[in-house]
Image (cartoon, grey):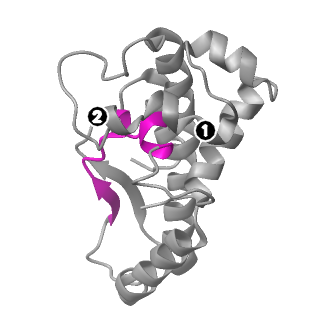
């Protein structure tokens, strides 16, 4: 799902209205979980820049492109140098990080999964930073939807899952009660 889209926010609100509101005053309920076992590390820039997952102009793709533009001060040459790419523009980054012959669809094992020739260390660092942007957006939308209909119960956050980094755990902990 594209957490940057208006549809995601509307779906979260609809879900909360149908499932949270009816139990908002339930004295037997302790609190709410957001989701279970999200694989944050698989939601890196390959995911957001993959045109088979997010079409050109989609909010998530636009957020990823906006992030790297800001990170590289709108300098595609600077980004190409850092990542070992030859992208003609920021909109063409898919050709570098998620080329058709190396299309990434949330399945990888063993090596880093980056296409050959790409500077995986810098791209991994940038991807980890964008995962925090994505996660913050997800937590904002979900907690707002729950709190819109229920301020009486605790937020437990996510069941299971791997947070991947201290930064992710710190971000996550700012949205939960327990």
Residue 101 in the image: above or below residue 19: above
Residue 106, quarter of picture:
top left
Give the extent of the magenta segment: 31-49
The x, y position of residue 42, in whole percent, is: 34, 37
- Label annotation for residue 169: none
Label 1 element class: helix
x and y, in percent, of residue 107 in the image: 22, 38
Camera-side residue of 32 and 81: 81
Q: Is residue 23 visible?
A: yes
The one of 124 and 153 positioned closer to us in this rendering: 124
Residue at position x 52%, y 49% in the image: 175
Helix, strand or loop under label 2: loop
According to the picture, the residue beneath numbered tag 1 turns out to be 92
- Numbered-mark total: 2
How packed mark 1 is, by other alpha carbons closer than 10 Å (few <14, some 14-19, many 20 or more), is: some
Outermost residue, left direction? 110
The image quarter containing residue 5 is bottom right
How would you rate the neighbour count of disc 2 (Cα within 10 Å): few for under 14, some for 14-19, many for 20 or more?
some
Residue 167 horizontal side relative to residue 24, left or right: right
Residue 162's disc is: 2
Task: Indicate the position of residue 15 as horizontal and vertical percent values.
Answer: 40, 80
Residue at (32%, 60%) from the top-left corner? 33
């Amino acid at each position: 799902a594209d957490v940057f889209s208006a549809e995601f926010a509307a779906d979260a609100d609809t879900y909360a209205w149908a499932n949270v509101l009816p139990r908002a005053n339930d004295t037997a309920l302790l609190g709410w979980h957001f989701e279970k076992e999200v694989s944050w590390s698989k939601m890196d820039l390959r995911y957001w820049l993959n045109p088979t997952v997010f079409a050109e102009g989609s909010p998530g793709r636009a957020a990823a492109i906006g992030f790297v533009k800001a990170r590289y001060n709108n300098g595609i040459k600077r980004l190409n140098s850092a990542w070992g790419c030859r992208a003609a523009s920021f909109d063409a980054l898919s050709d570098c990080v998620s080329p058709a012959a190396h299309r990434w669809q949330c399945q990888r094992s063993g090596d880093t999964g980056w296409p050959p020739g790409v500077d995986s260390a810098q791209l991994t660092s940038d991807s980890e930073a964008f995962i925090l942007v994505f996660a913050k957006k997800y937590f904002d939308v979900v907690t707002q939807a729950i709190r819109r209909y229920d301020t009486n119960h605790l937020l437990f956050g996510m069941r299971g899952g791997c947070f991947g980094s201290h930064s992710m755990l710190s971000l996550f902990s700012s949205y939960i009660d327990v």
